[in-house]
Amino acid sequence: MRKRILLFSVLGLSILSTNGVTAQTSTVYPRTTAVPFLRIAADARSSGMGDMGLATTPDANSGFWNLAKSTFSENKTGIGFTYAPWLRALGLNDVYLATLGFNTKLNDGRSAIGAGIRYFSLGNIQFTDANGNNLNQFTPREMAFDFGYAIKLSDRLSLGVALRYINSNLASGTFGGVTYKAGNAIAGDISLYYDGVTEQNGGGFAWGIALSNLGSKMGYTNDNQNKDYLPANFGAGFRYTYVIDEANKIHLGLEVNKLMVPAPPSDSGDTTTNINAMAEYRSQSVISSWGKSFSDGGGFVKSLQFSLGAEYSYADQFFARLGYFGESEIEGNRKYFTAGVGIKYNVMDFNFSYLIPSGSGVTQSPLANTLRFGISFNLEPEETK
């Protein structure tokens, strides 16, 4: 049960209060949101490159990152499935994320549609009262369904838009006079992708920009004042492809993400002041909260997350990947290296990624040893021009 409580703390689930986290030298208050599973890397290929996917080459999972990429896919249709056991370092064996992505080109290939499903299971939890007496068991789960459309604005630039329905069922029943229910929300994505890769040798630059999870707040009770923000995010990334020879290529990428959620108020030491500050924090409109997120907390630079990634390919059939993800202490202090491999066989891609352990004991990341597996089907490849 203690491990389950830790799981909820790690995920920052919104049915719990927002509390400060004591660091080594100061008390920090990281931004927390509802449905943080939407920020977990959705496929094994991207997670092998430090959780980056805004400007990587298009594939079946493009819609989870930047749907605009799908119009530049080398295949008419892509279908991808990924399975990721989650938080195994905490001894949890029934927590996992499963995703299913799909996209297909329309007409002459200048437009495409995409869809995706994310399912996050938090395992079975035994609820207890304040005295430790068993109440009931529950299996929390969250899911999101996406559908979108992308169109080329020019031969190099594409625009993508998507809608997302989110359902988060974390608890049910009445506890302490409060009735809990599943949370529901609608959100949307807007993305751009520029493909500057030359047709002569397949080398060059590409970049991607995306505004993700722009939508309503989410509540888990009938109290309309007690709602939490979705993990709205602004991301920008680029990729450079260097062609060594006809068989060997290297893709290098950098991605920067900014969580567009206001920082929670710090502890003033006075209960009344804290209650008023939290009420004001929760009462902000969604649009105003996006703007405030760029100037509050520890400053703009410290609120950024960085991903560095590299992918080596041989004959477009064998792939090796490395990556690094980092963020500041005030935003959660996640820092880790990743590695991955991929194999293309006929119309199928097999991808594996691994989150390399760092630290030891209490300093080791609860994400250590995370392993993802993905399989994709690439149908109707385009003819080489």
Image: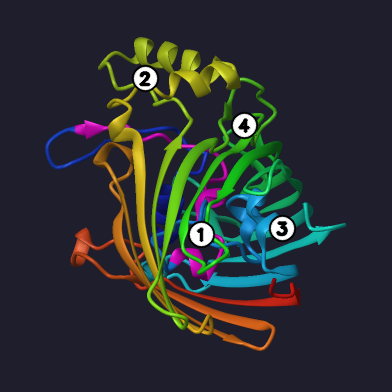
Residue carrying label 3: 116
Cα gap from disc 1 to disc 4, whole angstroms: 49 Å
Pointer 1 or 4: first along the chain: 1
Instruction: Determine the secondary structure under disc 1.
Output: loop
Q: Quadrant of the C terminus?
A: bottom right
Give percent across and percent down for residue 185.
70, 37
Q: Is residue 338 visible?
A: yes
Check the image and report above or below for 267 versus 22: above
Asked whether 29 falls inside the magenta stretch, the response is yes
Residue 80, relative to residue 158: is it above or below? below
The label nearer to you, 1 versus 3, is: 1
Neighbour class for label 1 at 10 Å: few (<14), some, many (≥20)?
A: many
Say which quarter of the image contains residue 380: bottom right
Identified at 28% across, 47% down, the residue is 333
Q: Which residues are magenta?
A: 27-47
What's the amino acid at mark 2?
A: Ser
Image quarter of the N terminus:
bottom left
Q: Which residue is mark 4?
A: 177
Residue carrying label 1: 56
Left or right side of 121 for 381: right
In screen coordinates, is 94 left or right of 362? right
The image's mark for residue 133 is none
Residue 101 in the image, given as x and y percentages of width and height: 69, 63
Circle 4: element type: loop
Crowd rating for badge 4 (residues with CA inside 10 Å; few <14, some 14–19, many 20+)? few
| Residue 366 among magenta residues | no
> Which residue lies under the disc numbered 2?
295
